Image (cartoon, rainbow, N blue to C red):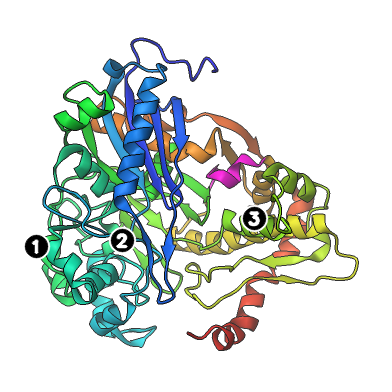
């Protein structure tokens, strides 16, 4: 354990939980972001042919409790040093629970599209799949609109109410995953403008108003009585229930902070919480965000703002469906039925190829795309292959293709915020690779600051947000509290080579979008 991660007896810590789609991470992190203990606990996603994607929320809680017990049992931090619990993770998912906060059915994940037909009845029409009046109302009030695919809380709640009547009858509350965990810790049903951002049911013109928008509630058809009361983002919901504290080994009175989406904890964990400080997530999916002093929406490129961490600042929100998932896909393809090559082996292969991968271009739309084009039919491809193409070139082209996709998004984000982004902080599992960070620097033509321990940035960010909630950390201190592995500067010779390749990248989508629609029509 390094000096930085060796806790002192006077340090105060947070039991931090990052509930990703792949399962929760549980950590002990100081109020100033020092990670003393961490553990990842995988869970399985259950998929169905009709678009279902669910997980067992009770299993989440069991894993979180077991992970917390092991963390406290490790002895790295004493129970008396833990002053808060803070949860972050996936959002736009829905957990139906009873009055005590216990699940009465599976969590419908952000991938679950079974409510699409019901959402389209509520908001559908000829303008990009929306009724013009409904789209204008939603964007004006909330900054976004429910997905006509059904893959968000409105689609989930409508599906529960109309198709899963037994679950709906038992459900007292429909909760976001982070709010579900907070309720299991405290017994209090609560949400925040940040955690409910994906539901598009709050008036984000005035996020200080802690109430749901009656026009949007009426238009959506969701039951207001099952939506949790709103509290301020970053506030303390309550304290850990006595029986939960006893089970986990916590002292009485530990505060529980309102849960936040991974977008918010990522911004804090990257040290990018002040205006226009940018961070790039290279996780399973990918996004590029920064705090922005205003409310704005670009419905064409699927970029918007959502209530942020501090008053007066929103966070730019967008998503690309395949980030690190593209490398994972290729890794599995190369396994040949055996053990897949390690990520170190994959990046070592990529390092053998020159920048530009011999002209091979990979378009990474393996799961469709959301931003800067919203096309769930789009699919990936290798382009410009020849008999001379090598395995290292193909592997490197995947890393480069994901970076080209980020540049396509970055151009949209910069138009959105009206300025060029400065240094960008990289987090997520993909940011472990110095090679990939260097590729991003060359493709984006700007410095990439590689955050230390980037795959656990959300755990760190969750603790820093707790530090802010308890008044122990100020926003202007956060950037200095996040350590960097290094800074990657663009190589201008590489920049020129990548500029030539990127000029073809959006053109591939334009040329092939008709083919995608024909071949991948539901």
Looking at the image, which residue is at 66% across and 76% down?
508
Q: Nearer the viewer, residue 505 or 342?
A: 342
* Residue labelled with disc 3: 327
Mark carried by residue 225: 1
Q: Is residue 266 left or right of residue 305?
A: right
Q: Which residue is mark 2?
A: 198
Q: Are marks 1 and 2 in contact (CB under 8 Å)?
A: no
The magenta span reads 422-433
Residue 276 colored in magenta in the image: no
Q: Is residue 463 visible?
A: no
Q: Secondary structure at mark 2?
A: helix
Q: Determine the residue positioned at 48% across, 60% down.
A: 413
Query: Which one is closest to the eye, mark 3 or mark 2?
Result: 3
Label 3: how many Cα within 10 Å (few below 14, some 14–19, many 20+): many
Give the residue at x 23% y 68%.
157
Q: Residue placed farthest to the left in the image?
A: 225
Q: Which of the 4 quarters of the picture holds residue 159?
A: bottom left
Sequence-first tag of 1 and 3:
1
In the image, 148 versus 175, the foreground residue is: 175
Is disc 2 surrounded by few (<14), some (14 to 19) or many (20+) residues within 10 Å? many
Q: Earlier in the sequence, mark 1 or mark 2?
A: 2
The CA span between labels 3 and 2 is: 27 Å
Q: Is residue 145 above or below residue 225?
A: below
Residue at (62, 59) in percent of width and height: 326
Res. 399 visible in picture? yes
């Amino acid at each position: 354990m390094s000096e930085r991660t060796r806790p002192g007896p006077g340090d105060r810590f947070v039991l931090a939980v990052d509930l990703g789609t792949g399962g929760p991470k549980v950590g002990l992190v100081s109020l100033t972001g020092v990670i003393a203990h961490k553990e990842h606990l995988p869970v399985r996603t259950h998929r169905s042919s009709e678009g279902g994607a669910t997980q067992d929320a009770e299993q989440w809680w069991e894993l979180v409790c077991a992970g917390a017990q092991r963390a406290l049992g490790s002895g790295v931090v004493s129970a008396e040093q833990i002053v808060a619990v803070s949860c972050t993770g996936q959002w736009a998912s829905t957990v139906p629970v009873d009055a005590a906060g216990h699940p009465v059915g599976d969590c419908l994940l952000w991938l679950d599209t079974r409510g699409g037909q019901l959402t389209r009845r509520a908001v559908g029409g000829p303008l990009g799949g929306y009724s013009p009046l409904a789209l204008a109302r939603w964007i004006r009030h909330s900054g976004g609109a429910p997905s006509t695919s059904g893959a968000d809380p409105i689609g989930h709640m409508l599906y529960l109410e109309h198709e899963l009547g037994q679950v709906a009858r038992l459900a007292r509350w429909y909760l976001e995953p982070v709010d579900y965990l907070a309720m299991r810790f405290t017994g209090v049903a609560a949400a925040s403008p940040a955690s409910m951002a994906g539901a598009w049911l709050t008036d984000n013109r005035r996020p200080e108003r802690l109430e749901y928008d009656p026009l949007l509630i009426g238009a959506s058809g969701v039951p207001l009585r099952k939506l949790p009361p709103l509290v301020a983002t970053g506030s303390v919901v309550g304290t850990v229930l006595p029986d939960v504290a006893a089970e986990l080994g916590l002292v009485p009175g530990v505060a529980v902070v309102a849960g936040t989406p991974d977008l918010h904890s990522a911004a804090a964990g990257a040290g990018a919480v002040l205006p226009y400080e940018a961070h790039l997530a290279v996780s399973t999916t990918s996004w590029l965000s920064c705090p922005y002093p205003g409310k704005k929406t670009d419905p064409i490129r699927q970029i918007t703002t959502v209530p942020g961490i501090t008053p007066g600042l929103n966070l730019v929100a967008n998503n690309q469906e395949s980030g690190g998932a593209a490398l994972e896909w290729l890794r599995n393809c190369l396994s040949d039925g055996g053990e897949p090559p390690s990520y170190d082996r994959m990046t070592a292969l990529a390092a053998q190829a020159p920048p530009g991968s011999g002209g091979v271009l990979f378009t990474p739309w393996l799961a469709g795309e959301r931003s800067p084009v919203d096309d769930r039919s789009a699919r990936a491809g290798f382009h410009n292959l020849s008999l001379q193409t090598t395995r290292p070139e193909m592997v490197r082209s995947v890393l480069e293709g994901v970076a080209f996709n980020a540049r396509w998004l970055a151009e949209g984000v910069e138009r959105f915020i009206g300025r060029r982004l400065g240094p960008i902080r990289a987090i997520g599992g993909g940011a472990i690779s110095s090679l990939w960070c260097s590729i991003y620097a060359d493709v984006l033509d700007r410095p990439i600051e590689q955050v230390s321990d980037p795959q656990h940035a959300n755990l760190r960010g969750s603790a820093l947000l707790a530090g802010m909630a308890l008044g122990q950390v100020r926003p202007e201190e956060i950037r200095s509290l996040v350590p960097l592995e290094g800074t990657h500067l663009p190589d201008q010779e590489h920049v020129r080579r990548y500029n030539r390749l990127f000029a073809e990248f959006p053109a591939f989508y334009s040329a092939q979008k008709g083919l995608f629609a024909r071949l991948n029509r539901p």
